[in-house]
């Protein structure tokens, strides 16, 4: 009896302490909200200039959520439509992406099979007017809003096209647009299916399944699933994609967070379509969230080899919560764990530095896990590939040409001057065309700054501030001259790299993703390595065996 009384006493003390802690916590919340409300009223009433209450509140909300993690967001009512379009891949409009290139609003991607593409809108077309309203130099958000509208309504576009002396006027009937998750699906060689998955919106798993079935009918016996630069999306689509290749009732991912009732383990529910086909999954720094669930789960079951680079490391789960006035909160509610037990979250947002920066989890806190077959894998910093392909860093000149839109614009000019599409599988930019590109670049007054140039300028400033400049002036001056000399030859030195990107962009202008794939896949070192591994059955099996 004494023991029972002792246990009861301890339990009562523990419950009382918890209740006190919760009461104290709620008091702190109420106190903080009261302080904020009175502070806001005082600022609104007495600040020297007029303030916009809505902007001020939005700034405070955004700053508060930003201190948590980059994925927790406030979504006001007027942004809900864009949020739904992002998460579902659906909206009503003409089915085209737009962007600003050279201060012009340009069609950058008319989706294949949708109204803009069917009406003859081309990559590189400049939008001059929409329904008679001039939109030149208007914000892209405003132009996008004019292009969207209820399905079955008509919109008139006035376009300026390279190679055409007069503007082109096209009438397009808007439709409900559902953007495909697949950027491209085709054969590499005679028997390897290549599927580039760009997103995880509704239907992603079915699209992968349908594409693979068609490619198997064409002779595919192996698969490359490209998840590079795929930022993720819906978790259940990731689960369904894994389910295509592993049996029913197998764990794919589990979630664990503060609200215990929300913790859940997600298993495969359906019969797979192929549990034998050899698979290579391509990953990179841009592969995040749902991409990491797919690549990590397939790795944990020794069902695929991963080729490329370490993934991003986003192991956080977001849930959407309804707020007042039809607004919403997208809030991080849990971390996810893949079958081996790994959580691949790379950044520790719970322990920020004094300056607000975030560190990765230290190696000392990483744990070792095992795949189903006994291979060693680790948590805390994304998914490590089985075969790492070192990144070939682009030259600063190439990056600048891309960022300034000059390669895109030159491709538009090239296609305007060559309206007949060449055989893209054999297409190469000739030396004559590259020289034309160089002449055109000169006319654009192209300039850029290299990282080495920036560092040298900083070194010179530091030397001047610390009064060492006179002693090192000759060496620093010599260094700057060498940098300038090298920069002058960059367009020639990086000719091969620049030419390949121009070829890809020209191919995209002609034939969208299919054209770009025809040109780019043969020059892609990660794809080439995946092909070699899939064609070497002994090495493929060796990589999936414990070391």
Image (cartoon, rainbow, N blue to C red):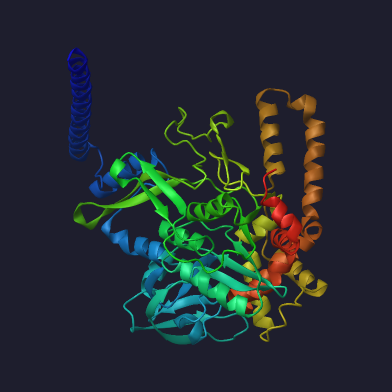
Q: Which of the 4 quarters of the picture holds residue 218?
A: bottom right
Image coords of residue 352 (percent x, y): 45, 31
Question: Residue at left 64%, top 55%?
Answer: 305
Residue 416 seen in this snapshot: yes
Asked whether residue 102 is in view, the answer is no
Which quadrant: the C terminus? top right
Q: Please report the residue visible at 23 percent of the width from the left and 22 percent of the height from the top.
A: 14
The residue lying furthest to the top in this view is 2
The one nearer the camera, 373 or 458, is 373
Q: Nearer the viewer, residue 222 or 332?
A: 222
Number of numbered discs: 0
Q: Where in the figure is residue 7, as x and y percent of width and height?
A: 22, 19
Asked if residue 38 lies left or right of residue 302, the reply is left
Name the quadrant containing residue 4: top left
Position of residue 144 relative to residue 451, above or below, is below
Residue 436 at x, y = what percent? 76, 72
Of residue 286 and residue 185, the one placed in the foreground of this image is: 185
Residue for point 69% across, 68% down: 520
Q: Is residue 373 left or right of residue 321?
A: right
Q: Position of residue 185 (x, y in %)?
A: 59, 72
In the rendered image, which quarter contains the N terminus? top left
Front residue (pair 252, 194): 252
């Amino acid at each position: 009896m004494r023991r029972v009384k002792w246990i009861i006493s301890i339990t009562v003390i523990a419950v009382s302490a918890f209740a006190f802690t919760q009461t104290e916590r709620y008091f702190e919340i109420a106190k903080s909200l009261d302080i904020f409300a009175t502070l806001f009223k005082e600022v609104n009433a007495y600040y020297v200039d007029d303030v916009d209450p809505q902007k001020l509140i939005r700034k405070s909300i955004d700053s508060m959520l930003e201190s948590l993690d980059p994925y927790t967001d406030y979504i006001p009512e007027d942004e809900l439509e864009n949020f739904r379009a992002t998460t579902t891949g659906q909206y009503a409009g003409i089915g085209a992406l737009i962007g600003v290139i050279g201060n012009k609003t340009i069609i950058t991607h008319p989706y294949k099979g949708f109204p803009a593409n069917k009406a003859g809108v081309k990559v590189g077309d400049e939008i001059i007017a929409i329904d008679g309203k001039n939109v030149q130099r208007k914000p892209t958000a405003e132009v996008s809003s004019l292009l969207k509208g209820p399905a079955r309504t008509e919109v008139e576009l006035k376009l300026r096209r390279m190679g055409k002396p007069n503007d082109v006027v096209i009438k397009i009937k808007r439709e409900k647009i559902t953007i495909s998750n697949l950027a491209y699906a085709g054969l590499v060689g005679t028997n390897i299916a290549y599927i580039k998955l760009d997103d995880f919106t509704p239907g992603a798993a079915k699209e992968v399944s349908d594409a693979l079935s068609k490619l198997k009918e064409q002779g595919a016996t192996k698969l490359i699933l490209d998840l590079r630069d795929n930022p993720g999306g819906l978790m259940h689509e990731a689960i369904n994609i894994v389910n295509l290749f592993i049996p029913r009732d197998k764990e794919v991912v589990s979630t664990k967070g503060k609200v215990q009732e929300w913790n859940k383990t997600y298993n495969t529910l359906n019969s797979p379509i192929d549990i034998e086909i050899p698979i290579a999954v391509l990953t990179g720094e841009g592969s995040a969230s749902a991409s990491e669930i797919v690549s990590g789960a397939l790795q944990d079951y020794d069902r695929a080899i991963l080729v490329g680079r370490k993934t991003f490391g986003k192991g956080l789960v977001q849930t959407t919560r309804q707020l007042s006035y039809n607004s919403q909160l997208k809030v991080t509610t849990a971390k996810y764990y893949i079958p081996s037990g790994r959580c691949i979250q790379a950044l520790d947002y719970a322990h920020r530095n004094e300056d607000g920066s975030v560190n990765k989890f230290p190696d000392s806190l990483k744990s070792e896990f095992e795949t189903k077959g006994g291979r060693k894998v680790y948590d805390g910093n994304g998914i490590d590939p089985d075969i790492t392909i070192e990144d070939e860093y682009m030259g600063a000149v190439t990056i600048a040409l891309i960022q300034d839109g000059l390669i895109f614009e030159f491709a538009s000019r090239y296609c305007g001057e060559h309206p007949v599409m060449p055989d893209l599988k054999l297409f190469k930019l000739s030396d004559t065309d590259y020289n034309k590109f160089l002449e055109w670049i000169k006319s654009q007054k192209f300039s850029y700054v290299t990282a080495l140039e920036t560092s040298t300028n900083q070194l010179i400033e530091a030397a001047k501030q610390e009064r060492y400049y006179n002693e090192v002036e000759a060496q620093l001056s010599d260094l700057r001259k060498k940098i300038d000399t090298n920069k002058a030859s960059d367009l020639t030195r990086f000719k091969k790299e620049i030419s390949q990107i121009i070829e890809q962009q020209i191919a995209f202008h002609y034939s969208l993703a299919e054209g770009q794939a025809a040109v780019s896949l043969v020059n892609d070192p990660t794809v080439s390595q995946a092909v070699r591994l899939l064609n070497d059955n002994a090495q493929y099996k060796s990589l999936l065996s414990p070391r």
